Amino acid sequence: MEQFQQLDYVMLILLASIILSVILSWFSLKIAPDVGLMDIPGSADHKNHTSSVPLTGGVVLIDTMIVMMLITGLWKTPDVWAILVAGLTIGVFGLLDDFIHLSPTKKLIGQLVGSVILIYLGVQVNIFDSPEFFYRTESTLDMWLNLGFTVLWLVTLTNAFNFIDSSDGLAVGLSGLSAAFFLVISLTTGQTTVIFFCAILLGICIGLYFFNSHPASLFLGDSGAQTLGFLMAAVAIIYNPNTGIQSSTWFVPILIFYVPLFDLMLVVISRLRRNKRIHKASRDHTYHRLADRGIPIHHSVLIMHGVSLIMSMVGYLCLNLPILFANIVFCLALSLGVAAFLELDKDYP
């Protein structure tokens, strides 16, 4: 009976988040032109929209999250409070970029500040000092490795979602799928904090998807894409399949974030190979390359959502497999990624 009551509460949170994000999205469309928070056509070479579009997805995300945290009282939970404060930091830097276009260095500084705040408030990876990790130094090096990997993980996911947010509905759809899977797998471990937090994130993503899907009437902007990436990375840290210290199932979040991580690696390595600046936006993402092969971009987005769904299901499957078989499945998934990378980057100018 208690489990059913919890599910009812989850559904209520989900529905409230959807409704609130839809309402705020609608209002943001009216306000954005007055405050100058618009994406102007032709402002960058890679953009192909023909009319000005509000960059208010991040504002809607942040506002909805704050309101839902206050309503549910979830902000009182130490982990959620840490994620909220750090996430707001990322959101503020992203909003500044939407208004005045920060340099790549300043963007990175913002991401590092958010990461340090999250760690300072008590949320970090604990892989290298896990009893089940294959090797431990039994020294302070384990602590520094955990801190370094935490920052690397947060910055990587933040940029992965920001990089991939160049097509209608793609980033918000991938975020929604990720939140949904973390919600589902957290139900099996009883981590109510993760369950309720993911219900809020999923609701926000669903609400935003109505406005951000093709043809988009609002864009996430840096404030939306970076914040979503950071929040999802933080959720992966506080989620634990064993409700204790993190163990050999560390690769499950990698499978859940398979598509944005793949796209990031494809773009970064490809640009380095062609001696192009990594941070300069270009039409060389996964969906652009699929479009070059005759697949419409909005169909490419759906394909990438489908791949994300499949890989998330594989990640869920790995939770119930013996460690050896789970690692074999993970290696096979990586091999598929390498094969796809070689195919998509083959003969690319």
Image: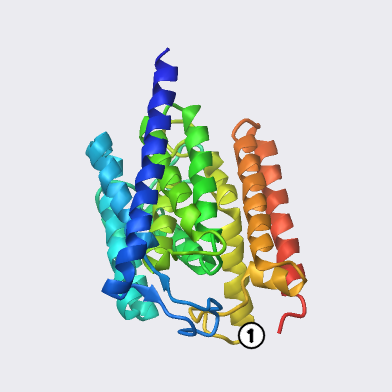
Residue 105, position as x, y percentages in the image: 36, 78
Residue 296, picture quadrant: bottom right
Q: Quadrant of the C terminus?
A: bottom right
Residue plotted at (73% across, 63% down): 340
**Residue 115 pos. (x, y %):** 33, 59
User: Front-most of 215 and 86?
Assistant: 215
* Horizontal side of residue 113 vs 227, given as left or right: left
Q: Please state which of residues 16 and 159 is positioned toward the viewer in this rendering.
A: 16
Residue 294 in the image: above or below residue 309: below
The structure residue drawn at horizontal position 68% and vertical position 61%, both measured from the top left corner, is 299
Compared to 3, does 259 lie above or below?
below
Front in this rendered view, residue 58 or 112:
58
- Residue 35 visible in this rendered orientation of the protein: yes
- Determine which residue is flagged by label 1: 274
Quick one: label 1, few (<14), some, or many (20+) residues within 10 Å? Answer: few
Task: Say which of 270 and 181 sits in front.
Answer: 181
Residue at horizontal 53 percent and vertical 40 percent from the top: 181
Q: Secondary structure at mark 1?
A: loop
In the picture, the quarter occupied by the N terminus is top left
Residue 191 rendering spot, x and y as whole percentages: 40, 31
**Kind of residue sitting beneath label 1:** Arg
Q: Is residue 288 left or right of residue 58?
A: right
